[in-house]
Image (cartoon, helix red, strand yellow):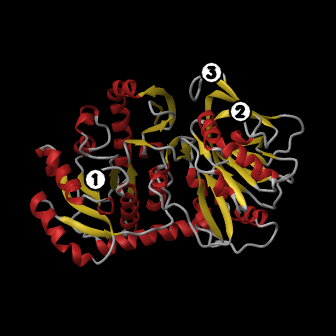
Amino acid sequence: MDPRPRYRPIMVVGTGSHVGKSVLVTGLCRVLRRRGIDVAPFKAQNMALNSGITPEGGEIGRAQISQAEAAGLAPHVDMNPVLLKPTSDMGSQVIVQGRVLGNYKGIDYYRLKPRLLPKVMQSFRRLQAAHQLIVLEGAGSCAELNLKRHDLVNMAMARRAKAKVILVADIDAGGVFGQVLGSLSLLSPGERRLVAGVVVNKFRGDPALFSEGIEIIARRGQKPVLGLLPYFRLGLPQEDSVALERGGQDRAGGSLRVGVVRLSRISNFTDVDCLAAEPAVDLRWIESPQQLAGLDLLILPGTKNTLAALAGLRTSGLFEAIQHYHALGGHLLGLCGGYQLLGREIADPLGVEGPPASEQGLGLLPVATVMAGAKTTTRVKAEALDSLPFPAPGELAGYEIHMGQTSPQGQSRPAFHLRQRLDQPVALEDGQVSPDGRVVGTYLHGILDNDVLRGGILAWAAGGAAVASLGDYAAFKDQQYDLLADLLEEHLNLEGLLEPLP
């Protein structure tokens, strides 16, 4: 029997989306880890297109992978037992304990939810048995009255876990009193009793100017304000595309201009986080043809619906503009769905991502893609091949999340050789390099996190010139988790949150 003390779970819920729940959970995981506590993150249901792969090959939300890193743990599917990946405005791919269950329209998913509750609780109990403390995360608003009946992730989960709840609000969005007091008033008396306090996030300016506001929230809400967190920007992965919709994801300052096309249903755009951290890079999100002017490198990231993303490129005028950018000598990198878009043809005869269809791609790589019914989710070890237009010696790590099978047309120039999948030896080719050496495509996510390869890509984009690089990206991320923990320690009253279980 484990002799270590156990603690009552802590849960972070929000007054809405993008108020800072994921970041606060990440920071709490690092704070508690630094205090010597074996802590693990948990989010019962996550809707996000940024995902990653566990060591066992299961798919979970990218935020939970970051939270696990902050806690010093390997990610596990129990940390995010239900993941929803929207394929359209009406439906999502449903992933349960790391594996695809199927595609469901919204109304059908609500009927499915009662069947998912045992899986959610199974994952939570396993995680709780293995660790001293669980920090749970809610989703969106904790007070959506029309969703409470089948709630898996907010206050119903807090009740099941018997968690001590922190309510987070975003003062930068405006209306913070309505956010907090309105949310508290819509909770049932039993739910309100679980709330230990309120955190007001993203405050700009002199904290003394909001002292009266803190008193008002505490008095009217009858809950203590645990702290006022200042607005800050750290190099932390974003959970979903809300961050892009609200702007602020460009990173200016460097001399090397890198553009990332903001595709519809964009997924795993955290692939470029490491480039945003590079001091030499000026990172821009591209939505119109005019923004391509002067770029040294253009990246097409992943997308959950490649044919829909292709239609979006045509509508915006970026389809022809990207072809023109290449014709003028531009360098392009396609990652997963972006790799598929760079090819000659994309076919979805089974309707895997939407209505069955087949369309011509950008035609910048001699490949064709057919959407397959089986989803590939795996971690890999690879090595760069000589066809790559830049050096990347040594072992490379990445992961695959895709539905399509892409095949070369004519002479093949693969970019990478896969040596391992989930620690099992394989001998497979991945990706393609264009005959002119200015277009590279790959299915490998996370490949840019490899420091040597990233440095090679930056030099390639700079026309062969040496580029001063960040170096150790893993160490940079770890530093960001510590900086976040320092911020929470300074601005939040965390005493009293730890409650030993009998």
The dot on residue 374 is none
Circle 3 SS class: loop
Q: What residue is rendered at 81% in x and 56% in y?
A: 329
Please identify, in this view, whether the residue under mark 2 or under mark 3 is nearer the observer. Answer: 3
The first of marks 1 and 3 along the sequence is 1
User: Which is more toward the observer, 442 or 460?
Assistant: 460
The dot on residue 405 is 2
Query: Which quarter of the picture shows residue 45?
Result: top left
Q: What residue is rendered at 37% in x and 69% in y?
A: 231
For label 1, the residue is: 9
Q: Is residue 367 visible to the viewer in this orientation of the structure?
A: yes
Determine the CA span between mark 1 and mark 3: 44 Å
Q: What residue is rendered at 62% in x and 54% in y?
A: 260
The first of marks 2 and 3 along the sequence is 3
Query: Which quarter of the picture shows residue 345?
Result: top right
Number of numbered discs present? 3
Instruction: Determine crowd level at label 2: few under 14, some 14-19, many 20+ residues with C-alpha closer than 10 A.
Output: some
User: Which is more toward the observer, 62 or 140?
Assistant: 140
Is 197 positioned to the left or the right of 260 in the image?
left
Determine the CA span between mark 2 and mark 1: 43 Å
Please identify, in this view, whether the residue under mark 2 or under mark 1 is nearer the observer. Answer: 2
Residue 56 in the image, given as x and y percentages of width and height: 56, 43
Determine the CA span between mark 2 and mark 3: 13 Å
Residue 436 in the image, given as x and y percentages of width and height: 87, 51
Q: Is residue 499 visible to the viewer in this orientation of the structure?
A: no
